[in-house]
Amino acid sequence: MTNKDARTPASAQTSDEVSADGEAGKSIGWHKAYVEGTRSDLRVPVRQVHLTNGRSVTLYDTSGPYTDPLVETDVRRGLPPLRENWVIARGDTEEYAGRPVRPEDDGIKHTSPRGGLRNLDAVFPGRPRLPRRGRDGQAVTQLAYARRGEITPEMEYVAIRENVEPEVVREEIAAGRAVLPANVNHPEIEPMIIGKRFLVKVNANIGNSAVTSSIEEEVEKMTWATRWGATRSWTCPPAATSTPPASGCCATPPVPIGTVPLYQALEKVDGRAEELTWEIYKDTVIEQAEQGVDYMTVHAGVRLPYVPLTANRKTGIVSRGGSIMAAWCLAHHKESFLYENFEELCEILAAYDVTYSLGDGLRPGSIADANDEAQFAELRTLGELNRIAKRFHVQTMIEGPGHVPMHKIKENIDLQQEICDEAPFYTLGPLTTDVAPAYDHITSGIGAAMIAWWGTAMLCYVTPKEHLGLPNRDDVKTGVITYKIAAHAADLAKGHPGAQEWDDALSDARFEFRWEDQFNLALDPDTAREFHDETLPAEPAKTAHFCSMCGPKFCSMKISHDIRREHGGSRAEVEEGMAQKSKEFAAAGNRVYLPIAD
Amino acid sequence: MTNKDARTPASAQTSDEVSADGEAGKSIGWHKAYVEGTRSDLRVPVRQVHLTNGRSVTLYDTSGPYTDPLVETDVRRGLPPLRENWVIARGDTEEYAGRPVRPEDDGIKHTSPRGGLRNLDAVFPGRPRLPRRGRDGQAVTQLAYARRGEITPEMEYVAIRENVEPEVVREEIAAGRAVLPANVNHPEIEPMIIGKRFLVKVNANIGNSAVTSSIEEEVEKMTWATRWGATRSWTCPPAATSTPPASGCCATPPVPIGTVPLYQALEKVDGRAEELTWEIYKDTVIEQAEQGVDYMTVHAGVRLPYVPLTANRKTGIVSRGGSIMAAWCLAHHKESFLYENFEELCEILAAYDVTYSLGDGLRPGSIADANDEAQFAELRTLGELNRIAKRFHVQTMIEGPGHVPMHKIKENIDLQQEICDEAPFYTLGPLTTDVAPAYDHITSGIGAAMIAWWGTAMLCYVTPKEHLGLPNRDDVKTGVITYKIAAHAADLAKGHPGAQEWDDALSDARFEFRWEDQFNLALDPDTAREFHDETLPAEPAKTAHFCSMCGPKFCSMKISHDIRREHGGSRAEVEEGMAQKSKEFAAAGNRVYLPIAD
C-alpha cells in the first residue's frame, strides 16, 4: 500500500482506514507499506499493523528492503541505490578513480587468526562502482545545504519518517542540533536523523573480532538488528579486520554505517600503536569514506595532558580508541596526531559528507570513575573540535559515557549540551551499576532511558554479553529490543508527537482482549505470542476475555468491563452515567446509590 | 565464620582479612557467614565472597538457611523458629486455641481446577503450633516498641544488616518512615526493614493460579527467588487457592510474607464479589494472621465515589483487588466495607503485628491513565487511612503504580511522601511504556530504578511474563535479578553507605583481569561465567589479561596497564609521575615531552 496523501507520524498513527489487502475484523498481522513524498523516487517505508477491529497502526520501520516481499534481497548482494539520483542531481560531486587497494589494507599479516577473514570479493560478489566526492570547493554536506536554506530529498525523507515539517529538519541540521549521516557513497541508505527534537535512535554495534566470528555472521547479525529496530548500525570490528561492509561491493545495510577508522589503521601497523602515523590514519579514512561509511568515530579529544588524569582511576581507560591514542601520545610524548591534524580531517570528511562522531576515549569504565576530571577535560576539547568541524560544514555528534550512577547522569547531558552547542549527544548506556555482568543490557538500559529523556539523541546498545564475550544473534536481539524500549520510553517522556499512540493502541487491545493485536503491536511479537502460548496454547485463548494469570473469573479488566456494561453501554455512556451518580453521591452523602436488589 | 566484632555493611564491605577456610590467592568462591549481635541467638547471615587476591567482600544475604550447608533444610519442612524466644520474652503476647478450620477456608468448591491444590497437610507435614496474639490492651507491634523508645532484637538485627546504628532503625520505625514486618506468628523470619533510609528492597510475587501450577511449584519458586536476592516474597495467589504458606505447618520462607486476604475471602463466596461481607473478610484476615502472614494488602482506598472516575480510562481498573472492591461497591451502591470497618481491621492487625500494605486498587494500567484523578483520589484516602493505622500502632506502607511514563514518575513519589507522612512507598515498576509485552521486566525496571532513587522503599518485581502468562522459575529469576539491579542502582544513586563498595570490588576485579572474582561478585555468577565461557571456554582464559571482545592485543584495559607499567610502578607512582609530566607539559607548551627514541 502506498499512501500518497498522509504523512506517517513519528512513532505511531492509528487509522480507521482498512488497508487494500486487509479485511476488517480479521487478523492479518502487519505488512510493509510506503509513504510517498513530493517525488516518485522518495518512498518512506513504514510498518503497518492491521488490527482485528479494522483499524491500523503505522510504525517507524528500520528493517530495510529485507522485509519487503516485492524486493529480492540477498545478504551477499547490495541493496538498490535508491538515493543515487539525488546525489548526482545536486551536481556538486564527481566520480573519480579512487584510492588504489593496497596489500596492507587488510592488515600487515594478510591473514586473520581464522584465516581469510576479509576475502570480501569472494564473500560478496558486488558490482564495481567508482567512488564519489565533492568537487573542489563545493560544500556537499547536508549541513551545508541546510545552512544555505535548501531542503534536500534526504531531509524530506526524514521529515516524513518523523512526522514533522521538512523545514524543522532543515533548521535543526543547520543549527547543528541534528545530523543526517549519509555519505555520498552510500546510496542504499534509508535516511534517518539524529537530534533531540526527533525520535531517539538506537545504534547496534556489530563487528567481527580478532578471536572469533566471520564477516558473514556479522552481516547476518546486522540484518537481524535492523529487523528488531536498530536505527543505526555501527560496524565496530575491534581488531583483526576492520573494513566496513562497503557500499556496492558487499552487503550494504539500509541504515547508516559507522566505523572507527583507528582500528583498521592499527591493523596496518600490525597492532603497534606507536607506529601509527597521521598518513596511515588519513589514508584509512579516505579508504573507508570511499566505501560509503556514513559516520566515523574519531578519538581526537584524547590529548596528551589528559592521560595522566586517568592514573588514579579505578579502571583506567576503557575505550579501545582512547587507550590506543593514549599509548601513542605517551610513546612519542607528543600531542595526539588526530588533534593536531583535525582541520585536515575535516576537509576529508566534508568531501564525502561523512559525519563526525567525536569519540569519548576517556569515558568512565566504572561507577567510581564517573564524571571525573579526565572525562570532562576531554568533553571540553570535544566542544572545541565541534566548533572547528562546523566551520568545515561537517556534521558532528558527540559520544558520551559509559558507567555512570543515576544521580550523575543528568550532569553529563547538561554539560555536553552546553559545551558542544547542543550538538547531538550519542551515549553508550550509561550503565548504572557494575555489579551485574550478564545483565548489562539492563543496567545500561535504565541509564539510557533516562539520558535520552533528558536530551540524548542516540543510544548505543549494550548486549547481555558486555564485559564477557561476543554477542550472538540472540544477544543482539535482546540488546536492540532493550534499547528500543529505552528509546521509546524517552520519546514518551519527551512528549514526542505520536509516540503515545503506539502505547494507546496496545493498551486498547489489552483492555479489549484482542490478543492477536497485542502480539502484532508488540515490539517483539514472536516472543509475546510464545510467552502467552506457553501457558494457554489453544487458539480460543487468543480471543478469551482472560489470561492465565487471573483465570476466567477474577480478571480485573473483565470486571471493569462488567462494571461498564452494568452501568451504561458505550464507554462514553458509562462515563456520563457514572459521573452523574458521582455528583448525586457527593450531593447527598454516602448513601445516595439505592441498592439494586432491595 | 562468625565475625563478632565487625558490623557488616549495608551493601558491601571489602576486607583484607582472609577467612578461616580460605587461602589467599586461591579462588574459593563464597560462603555463608554470620555476624553476631549483642546476644548469641542474634546471628545475621551474610554472603562472604572470597577474592583471589586474599580479600573478601561481604554482601547482604537473603537466601535464608537454604544456603547454609550446616542447616538441614527441606522445602516441605519449616525453618528453625529463630525469633520465637524474642517474641515470648517480651511477654505481651499469648498463645490461644486459634480460629477453627472451616470447610470454606479452601473455597466453597473444595477442589481446584486441577484438583487437590490445597491439600497442605499432605504436602507439608508440619508440626502443630498454637497461634499467638497480643494480650488485651497490649501494643505489641514494632511501631509501638519504637515509639516507646525500645530497641527490639528485630531492630538490632536489621541495624546489623543495614550497617546503621540500632537507634536509627528505631527512629525511622517510630516516625512511620520505615516498617519492619514481622508477625508474631512468623518466628522463622530473618527480619528486614523497609524504608527510604535503608537498602531498597525487592518483592517477588509468587502464587499459584486458578489455571495452572501447584503449591509445591510455587514454594520452589519462592526459594529460588530468595536465592537470587528477593528481599520480600508476596504470596499472591490470584484465584483458586489463596492460603499463604503458613508458619510452622508448611514451608515458611525466611523473608516476610505478604498476602491479599481479599482473594481468599472471595473464594469463600465462590468468586461472587457481591456476596463478600465484612465478616467473611475479617475471618480470613484472622485466619491468615494466625498463619504468620507479615503484611497484608488491603484495598481500603477504593471508595464508591472514585469508581466513576475510572470510566473514561483507557484500561479501567487493573488491580484485581481494586476491581473486586469496585464491583462490590457498585453492586450494593454502598461505601466499601474495608473503608467503613478500617478501625476494626487495625485492631486485628495490631494484635499480631501484621503490617498494612495499603493497596492501590485504582493504579493506572496504561501510560494513558497515569497520574489521573482516580489514582490520586485514592492516594489521598490512603493518606487518611495511614494516619488511622498509626493511631493503632499498626505499621503501614503504601502501594503505588503501575504504568507511568518517565516524566510522570517523580510526581508519584513526591505526592505519596507528602500525603502519607513519608510512610514507605512500595511500587510495582512503574512500567515506562506499554509497547513491549514479554519485556515488561525491563520497561518496569527502568521506572523502578528511578522511583527508588527518588525515595521508594520497596519494589514489586515484574517478570517477562507480565500481561502474558504465569512466570516459571526462569522468569522469576529474571524478574528478581532485574529488580535487584534497579534496587542497587538506586542505592548507589542515593549514596547509601557501602553500596558502592560492591561496584568497586567488581570493577577492581575487572581491571585486574581477575575473572573468577568478577563471576563470584556478580549478581548472577552462574550466567556471567556461562557467557564468558561461551566464547572462551578454556580454563586459562579465566586468568587471561584479555577477553573475547578485543582479543589479546587491543584490550583497552591491558593498554592502560601497559601505560602504567611504562610510566611508573604502582598506581600511586604512575599518578605522581604522570602528574609531574602533565605540569611540565602545561608549563612549556605542547612539546615538553622529549621523544624517547630521538
Image (spheres, coloured by chain):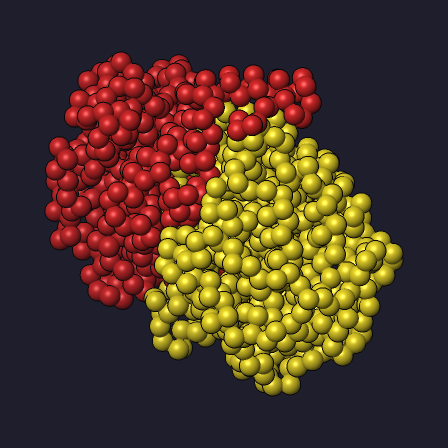
Chain colours: A yellow, B red
In this orientation, does residue A503 appear?
A: no
At 63% from the left and 31% from the top, the residue drawn is A335
Nearest the eye: A170 or B341:
A170
Q: Farthest residue to the front: give it.
A: B598
The foreground one among B292 and A273 is A273
Where residue B215 appears, as percent x and y from the top left, is 24, 54
Q: Position of residue B50 (x, y in %)?
A: 26, 29
Q: In which quarter of the image is residue B298?
A: top left
Residue at (35%, 24%) from the top-left corner? B13
Q: Is residue A86 visible to us here? A: yes
Left or right of B385, for residue A339:
right
Q: x and y percent of residue B126 in the render?
A: 13, 43
Number of numbered discs: 0
Quadrant location of residue B341?
top left
Considering depth in this image, is A494 or A356 the residue closer to the camera?
A356
Q: In which quarter of the image is the N terminus of chain A?
A: bottom right
In the image, taking residue A204 as reference, residue B514 lies left or right, namely left
Q: Residue at x 24, y 50 (%)?
A: B220
Q: In this view, does A292 lie above or below B82?
A: below
User: Can you name the residue that lies furthest to the right here?
Assistant: A149
Q: Residue at x 29, y 24 (%)?
A: B55
Residue A443: give x, y in percent of width and height: 47, 43
